[in-house]
Every structure is written in structure tokens, then in C-alpha cells.
Image (cartoon, helix red, strand yellow):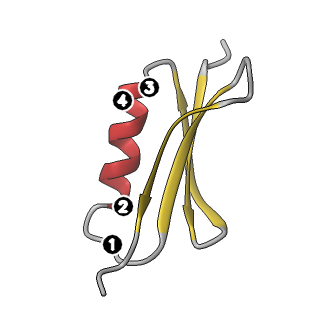
């Protein structure tokens, strides 16, 4: 069975992790948990596999 959404986490420009599922909130929580306590330019996005559109994203920047 194909999943509806795919979440990807990037550090700078490179992909560091990905996960698929049918629940946007669960995938969003997964992204935030994976980057918790880590420093750097992390960002992530959840893509709808049917439409190819980004449905949710986040960006985490290092403290100044």
C-alpha cells in the first residue's frame, strides 16, 4: 500500500532523513522530534504524494 504523504528533513541542502505515512500531524511531529536538540540549518517538508504539492513545512535556524 502506498502512503499518502512523504516527510523529508534537510540539513543545509542535503536530505538527512525521510519517512512516509498517512497522518500529516504524525509526520510533522516526527520531523520536529528528529531535529530537537540539534543545531544547524534544518528544514523539512511534507509532500502529498498524489499531487506533489508541499502541504506543511518548517525551518529551524541556529541561534545567533
Q: Nearer the viewer, residue 56 or 7?
A: 56
Q: Residue at x 42, y 34 (%)?
A: 27
Gap in angstroms between the C-alphas marked 1 and 2: 5 Å
Write down the residue under mark 2: 35
Between the residue at mark 3 and the residue at mark 4, the CA separation in whole angstroms equals 5 Å
Residue in view at x 36 percent, y 61 percent = 35
Residue contact between numbered discs 3 and 4, judged by CB atoms under 8 Å? yes
Q: Earlier in the sequence, mark 3 or mark 1?
A: 3
Q: Are marks 1 and 2 in contact (CB under 8 Å)?
A: yes
CA–CA distance in space, label 3 to label 1: 22 Å
Check disc 2: other Cα within 10 Å, few if <14, some if 14-19, many if 20+.
some
From the viewer's perspective, is residue 55 above or below residue 12? above
Q: Earlier in the sequence, mark 4 or mark 2?
A: 4
Q: Name the residue carrying label 1.
A: 38
Above/below status of 43 relative to 63: above
Q: CA distance from mark 4 to mark 2?
A: 15 Å
Query: Residue 46's mark?
Result: none
Q: Which residue is mark 4?
A: 26
Residue drawn at point x = 25 percent, y = 69 percent: 37
Q: Are the residues tagged 3 and 1 within 8 Å (C-beta)?
A: no
Q: Position of residue 61 (x, y in %)?
A: 40, 72
Q: Which residue is mark 3?
A: 24
Image coords of residue 55 (percent x, y): 55, 30
Q: Quadrant of the C terminus?
A: bottom left
Crowd rating for badge 4 (residues with CA inside 10 Å; few <14, some 14–19, many 20+): few
Label located before the other in sequence (2 or 3) = 3
Amino acid at each position: 500500500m502506498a502512503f499518502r504523504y512523504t516527510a523529508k528533513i534537510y540539513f543545509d541542502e542535503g536530505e538527512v532523513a525521510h519517512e512516509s505515512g498517512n497522518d500529516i500531524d504524525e509526520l510533522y511531529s516526527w520531523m520536529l522530534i528528529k531535529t530537537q536538540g540539534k543545531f544547524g540549518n534544518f528544514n523539512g517538508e511534507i509532500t502529498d504524494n498524489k499531487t506533489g504539492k508541499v502541504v506543511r513545512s518548517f525551518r529551524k535556524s541556529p541561534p545567533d
